[in-house]
Amino acid sequence: MKRAFPILAAVTALLLAYGFYLGQFVAPTERTMGEVQRIFYFHAPSGWTAFWLFFVNLAASVVYLVRRNLKADALAVAAAETGVVFCTVVLVTGPIWARPVWGIWWTWDIRLTSTLVLWLIYVSYLLLRRFSEGAQTPVLAAVLAIFGALDVPLVYFSIWFFRTQHPQPVIGNGGSLDPSMRPAFWMNVLAFSCFGALLCWARYRLELMQRQVHDAQALEALMDDTTESVKSVRGRAAS
């Protein structure tokens, strides 16, 4: 697996470069929004990547709650952290796109608000994992992850069922995405998904190594305490 990582990283870099090329130089300019619409090729794929990473976090959290599998817990942490990165990209690129098109940076409609709430939930998840060291922390975090995952369908379907300022769906039945723009879009979806998977994999391996180091340090500290206790008992016995 270690040998595969550089190869996958190189393939991902090529996909990202090709996706950037298609989005910036091959896809046609949108008639009403102009060049700023090209942010779409990074904004939407980042959202899709965040969604499936949060789904991985949900699945891993459920596995941990059922089986108390520590590797599943480590995967949940890695997926949540990586998902927050891509969700942050969504929240940053969205206002950049909205300002010249809507004339405002932000509006509190259902799609934008639910996305912000999703980001806040998973940031809270990461803060809980970072600053709480109790034995029940993984359990509490897993429950919070399940709660956070409930917001993902709300974010996705909000523009289907509510009137929002956010654009209507561009993919699927009734989608408005021009066929000439689809290759750039799907290539970036693939590239960002591979990038997300690569980051999650690297973060998962790092999390496992950190836990191994922590366990080794705890064992070493326990052995030192035991040694000191034995020396103390022998000293009292000799006296």
Image (cartoon, grey):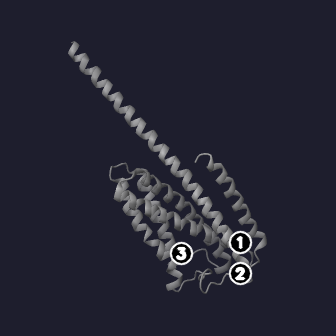
Residue under pointer 1: 184
Q: Is residue 60 left or right of residue 233?
A: right
In-front residue for pair 205/30: 205
SS class, disc 1: helix
**Residue beneath the point at 71% across and 73% down:** 183
Question: Mark 3 or mark 1, which has the lower sequence index?
Answer: 3
**Residue beneath the point at 68% across and 68% down:** 187
Checking the image for residue 161, the label placed there is none
What is the quadrant of residue 191 in the picture? bottom right
Q: Nearer the viewer, mark 2 or mark 3?
A: 2
The amino acid on which the numbered mark 2 sits, given as a three-letter code, is Pro
In x, y percent, where is residue 126?
Answer: 45, 56
Q: CA distance from mark 2 to mark 1?
A: 10 Å
Q: Nearer the viewer, mark 3 or mark 1?
A: 1
In x, y percent, where is residue 128?
Answer: 41, 55
- Work out which quarter of the rendered image holds the C terminus and state it: top left
The amino acid on which the numbered mark 1 sits, given as a three-letter code, is Ala
Question: Mark 2 or mark 3, which has the lower sequence index?
Answer: 3
The answer to the question of whether label 2 and label 3 lie on touching residues, with beta carbons closer than 8 A, is no
Residue under pointer 3: 112
In x, y percent, where is residue 206?
Answer: 52, 47
Residue under pointer 2: 179
Query: Is residue 226 shown above or below 120?
Result: above
Q: CA distance from mark 3 to mark 1?
A: 24 Å
Q: CA distance from mark 2 to mark 3?
A: 27 Å
Question: Mark 2 or mark 1, which has the lower sequence index?
Answer: 2
Q: Is residue 124 left or right of residue 173?
A: left
In x, y percent, where is residue 222?
Answer: 34, 32
